[in-house]
Image (cartoon, rainbow, N blue to C red):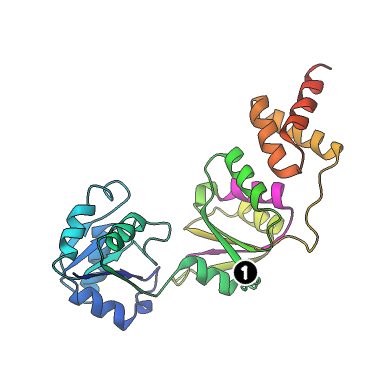
Amino acid sequence: MGTLYLVATPIGNLEDISARALRVLREARLIAAEDTRQTRKLLSHFGIHTPLVSYHEHNKLTRLDEVLGELTLGDVALVSDAGTPALNDPGYELVLAALAAGCTVSPIPGPSAPISALVASGLPTDAFLYLGYLPRKASERRILLGKVANLPYTLIFLETPHRLLDSLDDLLYVLGDRTCAVARELTKLHEEILRGSLSSIRLHFSTIEPRGEFTLVVGGPPSQPQSRWTEEQVRAALIEARSRQLPASQIAREIAAISGWPKKEVYQLIKLGTEH
């Protein structure tokens, strides 16, 4: 029975790959790659000719048996497009299946955008919460952020350039104007890490078009937990939510998640507002 190696690959700079990672990629029976075209470029650069098979979000379940079959004959390396596999990339199901089949699963550590951004952010690193990509819908983003708003951790998110401004707006709306760092193009030629308040970062990207993949690192809450909103604050949030023409049930759910008010009480205020 072979070993499933989870091999971290560069997130930009090819010099960041380890000697051990290169050896495992050379010696493996098979490499399961999220994008074979991307991985083939990496392998070609280092003169590695190990066979490749695609293993991505849309075929990860149908490919399980094939990869497990290869593991009965020898070692298999799992790689993502960049960084550490199985972290916001396909791999979780394969790891579970390999363990269930009695295979050894071994990580080959290396580049990771969330950890790289965190340690360079200037924010506390002793306790952090990594949440991956924020939800696409504003209402879902705000509900998620409301659930973590008072947790005593530095928060780490990934975001795409076309959703960055909307996400910064929701971070400001739910968490307040906290200290943050926004990292883009890490380890690449145009690496940039902006540090400051959420509002200042939001202002920056309102004048400069966001480009590249982003990692957002946001400071934890003030020492005192956020108290229940006043009725005036809730009414102001209701006005803002109505301007987006959201259904009453969605407004109540969203505001309840971030205000400390029970959804029933928020809904009652909505009803009172529509009666006047």
Residue at the limit of the structure toward the bottom, as seen here: 19
* Image location of residue 164, percent across then percent down: 56, 51
The residue most toward the left is 73
- Residue drawn at point x = 67 percent, y = 37 percent: 254
Q: Confirm whether residue 245 shows in the render.
A: no
Q: Residues within 10 Å of mark 1 (few under 14, many from 20)?
A: few
37 left or right of 73?
Answer: right
Q: Nearer the viewer, residue 47 or 271?
A: 271
Residue 156, image x and y in percent?
Answer: 57, 61
Q: Tell me if 216 is positioned left or right of 66 in this view.
A: right
- The amino acid type of the residue labelled 1 equals Ala
- Residue 197 vs 58, above or below: the answer is below
Name the quadrant containing residue 13. bottom left
Where in the figure is residue 101, as x and y percent of width and height? 25, 61
Front residue of this view, candidates 125 and 212? 125
Whether 122 is among the magenta residues is no
Whether residue 136 is situated above or below residue 217 in the rendered picture: above
Residue at which label 1 appears: 127
Q: Is residue 69 above or below residue 104?
A: above
Seen in the picture, residue 89 relative to 273 is either above or below; the reply is below
Determine whether the residue tagged by mark 1 lies in a helix, strand or loop. loop
Q: Residue at x 60, y 48 (%)?
A: 167
Q: Start and end of the magenta stretch?
A: 164-185
Whether residue 57 sits left or right of residue 115 in the image: it is: left
Is any part of residue 147 visible from this angle? Answer: yes
Q: Quadrant of the N terminus?
A: bottom left
Residue 170 falls within the magenta-colored stretch? yes
Question: What quarter of the picture does the C terminus occupy?
Answer: top right
**163 with respect to 189 (left or right):** right
Residue at 38 percent of width and 78 percent of height = 16
Residue 37 position, x and y percent, is 24, 59
